[in-house]
Amino acid sequence: MNRRVLGRTGLEVSELGLGGLFISRVGSEFDAARGAVLRAVERGVNYIDTAPTYANSEEVLGGILPEIGAPLVLSTKLGGRPEPFDAQDADALRQSIEESLRLLNRDRVDILMVHEPDRPGQFDWWSDKQRFIGPVTEVLEEFKRQGIIRFTGLGGTTAYEIVPIIETGQFDVVLTAFNYSLLFREAAEAVIPAASAQNMGIVIGSPLQQGGLARRFDDAVRDGAPRLSPPRRRQMVELYALLDETGRSLPEMSLRFVLSNPAVSTVLMGARSAEEVDQNADSVEKGPLPADMLGRLDEIAAMVPFRPFGEPFGFAAAFAREWSGPGRG
């Protein structure tokens, strides 16, 4: 598998990385998770991302990583632990990474990210909200000096709120999820340009929009799923027609699209099994999409340039036949 440089870290990472959310009780039993991790490494994946808030992902990975002799680039995050979590408490931040290291069976991690520093109301990370500094930035520097971490990062899900934090130049890597994929291009407007200007490593999460682009929903699109706007349905019809024309699967097109952007360092898969790892790795190894195909996809994406109001954050829920209303889907 090809590798790319993770921005100013200088680390070489596989174009396909492994996201840890589904390497947990959320996604699969331990044996399936173990199979996914080991197969990913066999296929050349060397970047693994997890977080304390990904259920028991760190613990599961900690039970698997001792079996792996190949060098890995391991990323985890601060946030959500210990509970109740106080992002202004330096001791709590230290406890968070100490627990992560214990669970992961590691004495250090390559990258430690501030988790959700951009979502309003998530965690109150900054004591100085103009310069984006506080106990967390002090503790991160302390961890660097001690050799507990090598690099720092931001793990976010917004398209614009995270940009001023990126522009401080304090962080080495950014993980942006849910906003750079076949149909959702908001990160291309601000996050990716801002991170590129800082020579940050750029990690793309949720390229399949948590399942909305993992498989086709022809019946729901045709029948008018209640949470799909008419423009979105027309867009999906065009996308599915292009897939039929080219003979490509939706996951393949999705992964290859993301990696067609040379600014992207790696894209995370949410594989739950060795079989899913193989499917994703096979797609990535076909390389970036040709220019004419990217042009066709740009035209389709432009049909709905921004997410319609009421469309669910987890895009797969848009195809559900039953809708429980805002805030519950």
Image (spheres, rainbow, N blue to C red):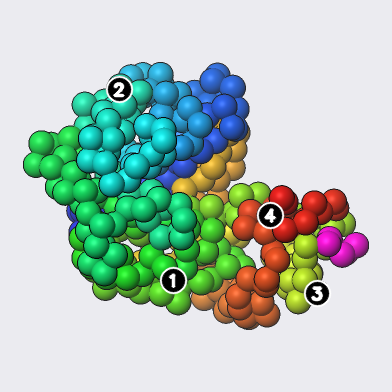
Name the residue tied to disc 4.
327
270 sits left or right of 91 in the view: right
User: Which amino acid, mark 1?
Assistant: Tyr
User: Which amino acid, mark 2?
Assistant: Arg
For the record, the magenta segment spans: 222-226
- Label 4 crowd (10 A; few <14 / some 14-19 / many >=20): few
Task: Give the Cα distance between marks 3 and 4.
Answer: 21 Å
Asked whether the residues under the numbered discs 4 and 2 touch, taking CB atoms below 8 Å apart as contact, a structural biologist would say: no
Q: Which mark is residue 160?
A: 1
Quadrant position of residue 144: top left
Asked whether the residues under the numbered discs 3 and 4 touch, taking CB atoms below 8 Å apart as contact, a structural biologist would say: no
**Which of the two residues, 46 or 191, is positioned nearer the viewer here?**
191
Name the residue tied to disc 2.
102
Q: Position of residue 100 (x, y in %)?
A: 32, 30
Q: Residue furthest right?
A: 223
Asked whether the residues under the numbered discs 1 and 2 touch, taking CB atoms below 8 Å apart as contact, a structural biologist would say: no
